[in-house]
Every structure is written in structure tokens, then in C-alpha cells.
Image (cartoon, rainbow, N blue to C red):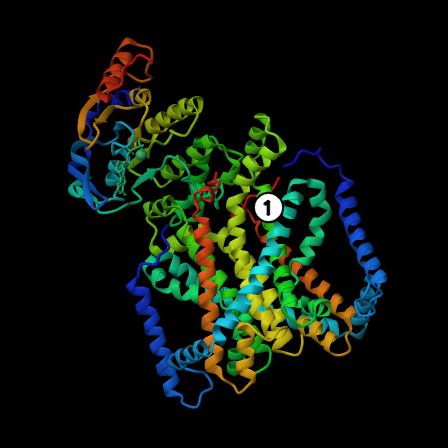
Amino acid sequence: MSLTNAANTPAVAAMKLRAEQLCVAFERDSKSVSVLEDITFDISDGEFICIVGRSGCGKSTLLNVLAGFLAPTSGSVIIDGEPVHGPDPRRILVFQEHGVFPWLTVEGNIGFGLSKLPRAEREHRVAHYVQMIGLQGFERTYPSDLSGGMKQRLQVARALAVNPDILYLDEAFGALDSITRLAMRKELLRIWQTERRTIIFVTHDIDEAVQLADRVVVLSSNPARIEDILTIDIRRPRNISSPHYLELRDKLLEQIGQAYTV
Amino acid sequence: MNSLSKPRNWEKYFWPVLAAALLFAIWHYCVVWTGTNIFPSPLDVEKGMAELLHKGVLWDDIEDSVRRVAVGFGAAAVTGIPLGLTLGLYPAANQMVNPVLQILRPISPIAWIPIAIILFGVGDRAAVFLIFLGAFFPIVLACVSGVSSVPSIFQRTGRNFGLSSTQLLARVVFPAALPQILIGLRIALGIAWVVVVAAEMIAVESGLGYLVIDSRNSGKRYDLVIAAMLLIGVIGLILDLGFRSLEGLPSVRWGFRHES
Amino acid sequence: MRLKLHVQPRPLLFIGVLLICWQIAINRHPGQLLPGPLSVLRAIGDLMHSGLLLKYIVASLFRVTWGFALGASLGIPLGLAIGWNRRAEMALNPLIQIFRPISPLAWIPVAILWFGVGDMAAVFLIFVGCFFPLLLTAMSAVHNIPALYIDAGRNFGLSPFAFVSRVLYPAVAPQLVVGMRITLGIAWLVVVAAEMIAVNSGLGFLIVDARNAGNRYDLVVAGMVIIGAIGLLLDLGMRSLERVKSFRWSYSED
Ligand SMILES: Nc1ncnc2c1ncn2[C@@H]1O[C@H](COP(=O)(O)OP(=O)(O)OP(=O)(O)O)[C@@H](O)[C@H]1O
Ligand SMILES: [Mg+2]
């Protein structure tokens, strides 16, 4: 119970990540097109953040900048007081799909980032995460024989195994069917609550954002600016038919510019 | 993949045997009807094969051909794979070198025979050089395209986990490109087998290719010619099957579409 | 259409450096049989001047065209039919697999016996060299048609003719075009080799003849350069066919 309380009080935790006036522009037809403009926010340690916005607005770009894969045109990302200059095993980016290595087994994938550890320690950790994502009995299986959901869990486990402080997920459940997606959300919340990582989760799905996040960052389009940062003050486990839930969801839908009738 | 019902078990053996029997029968009666006494019937070929086995030269010829292919192909793989991987990793270098490869590649290895003879004289080394040339370009090009088609997501993941660039090559790029590299090696091996026969027909005096041309030139022994051709086919098939079995290895199987 | 004909300075520079190194190496070892790039250039000039070059190029291309056309017009339909019929494939596959690795050149004695020394023999060798690869390409192209397309075609109740022209042909065309490009490359390898043994004209003959009649190695290398250049042009031509719109799609992985 104390865990769930902590999750709802991010304000007391230490600051983990700060984005300062991030701007990104791409060359398109030899013209410079601004994709991100003046993105500024703070994220505390152990917080669960969702980023939502319309397709093509720049969510993946923002995540790539935060993870160090893309240098911003101006502005900076500061993590634990140090500016980010490139990718780092302390912060792992999980891709939407096709991210697991097809030439490695389940074990090989989970152990990919652990080659520096002594053998016994490595095996121990691999076994732990195999257990956590429920792939016992599949240790020696290659990804081509796994389902889409299993592969996605495997990608998350591979990231968690190196014990990162921050996990970036880019529409990590976007390619899954709705039942698997629900299960994966529960799974991710459970992992987050037991392992206390900072998670930054990009999604299309408003419901997903309201179910998962402590705070939701809403991006506008062309170029992307921060439209709003919405605090989801619902206790976990969340009741997804409570009036407050629906109210927050409708507010988000409105901000994204979608009516909530079909 | 077709409209007919699923074949039964016995058909797996019945149809190939029937087809082979038909082929032999047609061949036999064509020889009989045309009354040729140069072109052999299947029975003559079988006798010729027995004669070759009996004389014992056959094993030497097979050994010579296979050795040349092994050395030439091995040299091409040992030099071509590193070069191809490097060019694949550094597009700027590839852009510079690729046109040269594209110009050299369509030159038939056989056309190099005069040059090979100047450089190495008539003998094994000239033949090995020709096989090397035939195998080298397909291997390099397969590696280049294998590496450059590795999804960027894999490389980015590797870097995210803090790999250095050599680790990235060894643990991500190479395994990701391996299926394509294997396909390139298999094609190159097929070419090497074609080239060795041709080279032996022109540039050296032993091996299966020499057996073919020599059987014709010394006494029009067409039964031996056809027997040697069939042997070339069978050995080529065995080489190919051997290589193909590598495609079943678990760490590369994902890269091949297997018929179920 | 990006035929990459716009001039790229760096590769040209690299080729220039290689040529200069070659020339320097030759100058340092006078009395070598191997020619330098300048004498090769001069040899190409001589060949053009005497009209021999054009004659030989035409002879080689003539053989390749006929051999390839015959191989394609027999190999592709046969391969499609065999690939479609599982029993025919069971029956013929082992034989095809044995014939395929036989070097086309090993057929030379047979070709000479049947057709005598001349164009027909060379065309036959190229035919053999093209027939089996195209047969196998067509067979595997049929296998790779996703079952989905076939079922969809049946579902819409197409007539057999419409089925072939609207489902089968478009589905296999991209793979066939790639297979044809690779096979044309093989044909170009075979014609040179065949001309070195079985006939007395063409670019392959130019090479052996130049060597045997007086060690004219400048002509040998000139012949090789021409062979490389024409092979490259054939390849580029086939590649531009691959870019034709209706061939361009192919099954993406997964
Ligand atoms: N390397 C690049 N060069 C030029 N433009 C780019 C590049 N990468 C992305 N863009 C552009 O930036 C914009 C944002 O792309 P991004 O992939 O971040 O969108 P997204 O919000 O993740 O979309 P989706 O929800 O569909 O994944 C798009 O308009 C895209 O065209
Ligand atoms: Mg995206």
C-alpha cells in the first residue's frame, strides 16, 4: 500500500530528468521544418509519464532526443544533473516492434546487456526476468516462435535486465491486440511498482495514458509544443469506469481535438 | 500451393523414380532410333562410369577439383567477408569502391585465364586464382547488402546497451547480416563449381573438367564425357546440400523462409 | 528513374588513382608481358579502328540474346507449371537439381557433337546456362506467392485465364525480373568462356586469339575491359526494368 501511495505523490521525490527548451528542426526539401518547439518539463524519480499527441506530431522524435539518439537543434536534456550526450545503458529505449534480436534465444536476448557480469550473476538475473515476464519454458526458444505479445514482453525484460534508471517506451504496445494490451499494461504497472523505475511512455491511446500515468504530457501538432501537463490523481488500482476517470479521459480527448462521440 | 490434393507418402518416391526412368528410356530409344555410334546410351554411360572407377584415376580427378574449389573459395571468403563488412559499415568507402567492383564483376573469371597463366603459370595456382575471382565478388556484394540492410533499430538497440563499435559489429551487425551472407556464400560456391570445371578445361591438365575435355579429344569417348558430366552434377548438388544444411542452424534460421 | 548517371567525383577519383598506380607499376617493371592502362586504351582504339571490336561485340551479343531468349521462353513457363503442380515438382526436382550444377561449359563436347563448331553450339551453351536458373527462379516464385492471394483470387471466382493474368503473373513478376537479371549475368559469363573454346569470333575469342597469336596482352586486357563494361551495361539495363512500376512492389518481410 505504501508503494501505491508513493506513486501518487511524485512531488516529494527527487528530480530525475529535465527537458529545457528543446527545439528540433529537420531538413525537408532543403527547407528547415520545425518539429519540436520549446519543450520544457521536469520528471521526478520513479514517476510514470505518458506522452500523447496526434500521429506524426513528434512523439518519437522527442523520445529519441530524451534517450540521446538525436541531438536537439537547441535546448538540452539534463538527467541527474548531467546533460545527455548520447545513448547510455542506464536509460533504455523500447521500440514499438521488431526490436528483439531474432538470432538470439529468449535467454540470449534478456542477457544481451549483461555480458560484463560474471556468469552466475548473469544467469540469476536472466532467470529472474524470464520469471517476471512469464516466459518460463521458453528460455531456449527463438523469437520467430514467439507471439507478438511475448516478443514485446521480451523487449521490456531485456531493457529491465540491465537495471536502467529510466525506461523509454515508444508505443510499446501499439502492435498488440486489445486483450494482450490490457494484460501488458497490468504487467508494466506491476513491474514499475516493484522495481521503481522512471518510465516515459509514448502512446496514441488516451485510455492507456489515463490508466497508466502519474502525469500525461499532451503535445500539439505542427510544430509540437506542450499543450498541457495533466496530473492523473486517481488512486491505484484505478477504477476505469469511475466518473473522475471518464472526466480526465474526456478532457484529454478534447485537448487532442477529438470529439468523444462516435 | 496448388489445386491438387495432398500427395500421399508413396508418391514421394514413385514420381521421381518414374520421371528418371522415363528420361532414361527416352534417351535410350533416341540413341537407338538415330543409330548414332558416337553419342552413348545410358547403358554405355554406366559402363563408362564403371571403367573410370576401375581405373582409379577418377578419385584423383575429383580430389583435384574439390581441392581447388576449397582453396579458391576459402580464400575468397576469408578476404571477401571482412572487405564486404567494412564497406557495408562505411557507406562513404562503399560509394568509392563499389563502382570498381561493379566493373570487375561482370568480367568472366574465364576471361582472366591469360592473366592467370602469366601470373601463376599453367597449374593449380592459376585455377585457384580463377575460382577465387569467381567467388570473391558475389561474397563481397552479399556482405555489403547484408550489412546495409540491417534494420537501424538493431544498431540503435546495441548502442543503447553501451556496446563499443567492435562489439556492435560482432554482436549485432554480423549476426543480423549472417543469413544474407550465407546466401551469398552459397551462390559463390555454385559459381566456384562452375568455374573450376571451365578452368580445368582450359588451364590445367587434371580434374573433372579436364576429364570431360580429354575424353572427347582423345578418342571421342562420349560415354566418359557424359559420365563425368553426371559426376559434376552430383558433386555440385552435394556441395550445395551441405551448405544448405547450414541454413537450418538455429541462430540463422529466422532469416530463411522455409517451406512447411 | 535514378540511373545514377550523374557524375560522382569520388568514385571517379578512386578509379583514376587505381589506374595511375597500375601505370606506375608497369613503368617500374619494363619488359613485363602485362600492359599498362595507356597501351590498353591504344589497343581499344586499334580494335575500334579496324572494325573488329564492333563485329565481335555484335557476335557475342547475338549469341547471348538468342540463348537467353530461348532459355527464358522455355524455362519460365515450364518452371511456373512445375512450381504450380506439386506432383510434377516431386517428379522432376531431383533431376533438375542434378543438372543444374553441371557447368554449362561441361556441355561443350555435347554441343559440338550436336551442332558443330559455330554459333549454334555457343547459343546452346548459353541456353543451358540460362535454362536451369530461370526454371528454378520460376518454381520458387510460385512457391513464394502468399496463399492469401491465391485464396482471394479463387474467392472472387476468376476464370483460369483471368486468374493467371491478374493474380499469378503480377505476383511472380517481381521475382522473375530479379532472376532474369542474375541469369543474364550468368549468360554473359558463359558466352565469353564458350567463345574461348568453341567458336572463332566474339569477345572471348578475341582474348584467346590475342594471346595465342603473338602474346598481345594489351588486346587481352582491352577485351576484358570491354567485357566488363558491356556486362555492367546489361546489368544496369535489367535493373532499370526492375524499377518499372508494376514490378516494384515485393513482399515486405513479415
Ligand atoms: N529523420 C527525419 N528527417 C526529416 N523529418 C523527420 C525525420 N524524422 C521524423 N521526421 C518528421 O518529424 C515529424 C514527427 O515524426 P515522429 O516520428 O516523431 O512522429 P510521431 O509523433 O512519433 O508519430 P507516430 O505517432 O505516427 O509514431 C513527422 O512529420 C516526420 O515526418
Ligand atoms: Mg512514433
* Image quarter hosting the N terminus of chain A: top left
Residue at position x 53%, y 77% in the image: C207
Q: Residue lying furthest bottom in this view?
A: C31
Quarter where residue C64 is shown:
bottom right
Location of residue A203 in the rendering, given as x and y in whole percent from the top left corner: 31, 28
Q: Which chain carries label 1?
A: C
User: Ligand 1, what quadrant?
Assistant: top left
Nearer to us in this view, C208 or B48? C208
Nearer to us in this view, B216 or A185? B216
Callout 1: helix, strand or loop? helix
User: Residue beneath label 1, please?
Assistant: C140
**C102 left or right of A28 in image:** right
Location of residue C187 in the rendering, given as x and y in whole percent from the top left corner: 56, 62
* Image quarter hosting the C terminus of chain A: top left
Location of residue A129 in the rendering, given as x and y in whole percent from the top left corner: 43, 35
Nearer to us in this view, B153 or A155? B153
> Is residue A214 depicted above or below C60 in this figure?
above
**B24 left or right of B103 in image:** right
Location of residue C195 in the rendering, given as x and y in whole percent from the top left corner: 59, 72
Please indicate, yes or no, whether residue C103 appears anywhere in the rendered image. Answer: no
Residue type at mark 1?
Answer: Ser
Quarter where residue C32 is shown:
bottom left
Q: Residues within 10 Å of mark 1 (few under 14, many from 20)?
A: some
Please indicate, yes or no, whether residue C81 appears anywhere in the rendered image. Answer: yes
Residue at position x 30%, y 21% in the image: A206
> Is residue B179 depicted above or below C125 in this figure?
above
